[in-house]
Amino acid sequence: MPFSSLSDIQNRLNNGETTAVEIAQLYLDRIAAFNSTLNAFVHLDANHVLAQAAASDAYRKEHGARALEGLPIAVKDIFCTQDGPTRCCSNILEGFEAPYDAHVITKLKEAGAVLVGKTNMDEFAMGSSNETSAFGPCRNPWDTERIPGGSSGGSAASVAAALTPAALGTDTGGSIRQPAALTGITGLKPTYGRVSRRGIIAFASSLDQAGPMAGNVKDCAMITAAISGHDAGDATSVSDAPAIDWLAACEAQDMKGLKIGKPKEYFVDGMDAEVRQSVEAALQKCEELGAEIIDISLPNTEHAVAAYYVIAPSEASANLSRYDSVRFGHRCDNPEDLLDMYTRSRDEGFGSEVKRRILTGAFTLSSGYYDAYYLKAQKVRTLIQQDFIQAFEQVDVIATPTSPIPAFKLGEKTDDPLTMYLSDIFTIAVNLAGLPGLSQPCGFASNLPVGLQWIGPAWHEDTVLAAAAAYEGATDWSNQHPAEFNMNGGES
Amino acid sequence: MDIDVKKVAMLSRIRLTDDEAAELGPQLANIIGYVEQLSKVDTDGIEPTAHPHDAAMPLRANIVTNGNRRDDLQASSPKIESGLYVVPKVIE
């Protein structure tokens, strides 16, 4: 039963029907059978996975089960892990072995999870298609000629093809939600500050947030419950975040009394007609479940992409200055002097999209341009946040499409970076405002999955999860799987 | 917008070959041209947002929490001698 949810596996483990070692072996077999097709995993140590599973079985026997006991979870190559390499899918981190675990990795280990390797991603999480990875592109299980979305493309593809029941991703401008949408799975970006960023390789520090990608809403809640909470080691981790009951939120059966905002700026000309139809039909379903759909406006949405493509590259150019080839990472051969060492190592180590963003950020932060670009973008960010605050005076939650288009073909958008950037128009504002956002499957366009995005007020992941759980319970979209992968590994 | 790509690349400590500079120049101009739209937004009296929730920067006690791990931390460096990072000669 490869397409099992975490809670199914948990039940079978608790009943003694199976063991963590058996479960780990099942997914390792599937990875062995299918990863050459998908390129979803970039590092995997099967013996280490089995050793963790055996240790989990022993722990269960002696002490009982912890929250994620024996459950396999893959993690994006952006999380520092002490066991094996951490590359952020970049050549500049060639040979890097993290000296410590990311805080969320520690939390997963403390909860008894079995970590099943590192997943493919756009280099330094900069991309929307997983095509900028130094390890080559990852492919979409629904059509292997197409991209899985990005930047958490490997995590999305591995869950969609059941190479793992769940994975962690990170989301700076949509990097959990967009690939979740394009591969027909569920992904949650928590409120900024809910999950510690320590040990997650930084891209844009005021936007980055880690979260789960899984087969259903409850699985996402289980993982977020385990990884969230204040971390004194991350200055942006919020210490007085309101506590919520993650699992109780997923028990919602209907939407009686729920006010759902439908922002007109997210239903626009140029978006795919079938995507629009699927999301409109989903909202109709919500009405049948008792929700009230209220037309709203988020007037500054049109400036979100521009603000993001100033703020994110600016912060990236500062964060990526640490790759100086002194303390870690790639160093060029025979440097003539210090400047030659810096400039040639960085030219050789970074891919073209990363260079483009560093240069964009260096320009927008440079003397004479800071006020006109970076400061201005931060002010526009305030306006975007205010739009949401005003909307949430009227509604409980907002529903939109996650992506204006379904998965596109490999190479289709690589020639024009700006066109690629515009594929994130529906996810970016959520990061700028620091809000929780979830994508779940709600239909198909040209036989490719379509994502429905839920946006909640800050710290109200429970509202988002409840709406998504009720929709999931009333529809069958989360039970659809790509036929090519709907078999056991040994049969392929 | 005319952008001196080589200058920005030097600020970023990235060597660019002439071919790379020729490709990146128009792309950067295109991106900056797109974000120019921000200048039309009225932001008079609007405060900039740095942290989405306006959280105060917390302070912690100044105590050692993870001990002396120099060897672990230097293990990934391209060149180490006697616990020191080795780089090309800086001063003649």
Image (cartoon, helix red, strand yellow):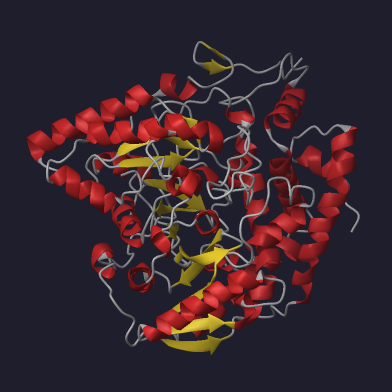
* Above or below, comparing residue A91 to residue A71 in the picture: above
Point 28% across, 65% down: residue? A243
Picture quadrant where residue A377 is located: bottom right
| Quarter occupied by the C terminus of chain A | top left
| Quarter occupied by the N terminus of chain A | top left
In the orientation shown, which residue stands out farthest toward the left? A62
Q: Is residue A492 left or right of residue A446?
A: left
Q: Is residue A168 left or right of residue B67?
A: right
Residue A404: give x, y in percent of width and height: 63, 67
* Residue A366 visible in the current orientation: no
Q: Is residue A433 left or right of residue A226?
A: right
In the orientation shown, which residue stands out farthest toward the top? B82
Residue A254: give x, y in percent of width and height: 31, 79
Picture quadrant where residue B5 is located: top right
User: Which one is nearer the viewer's eye here, A89 or A491?
Assistant: A491
Residue A336: give x, y in percent of width and height: 78, 17
Point 28% across, 63% down: residue? A246
User: Which one is nearer the viewer's eye here, A462 or A280?
Assistant: A280
* Residue A48 visible in the current orientation: yes
Residue A362: give x, y in percent of width and height: 74, 48
Picture quadrant where residue A346 is located: top right
Point 64% across, 75% down: residue? A301
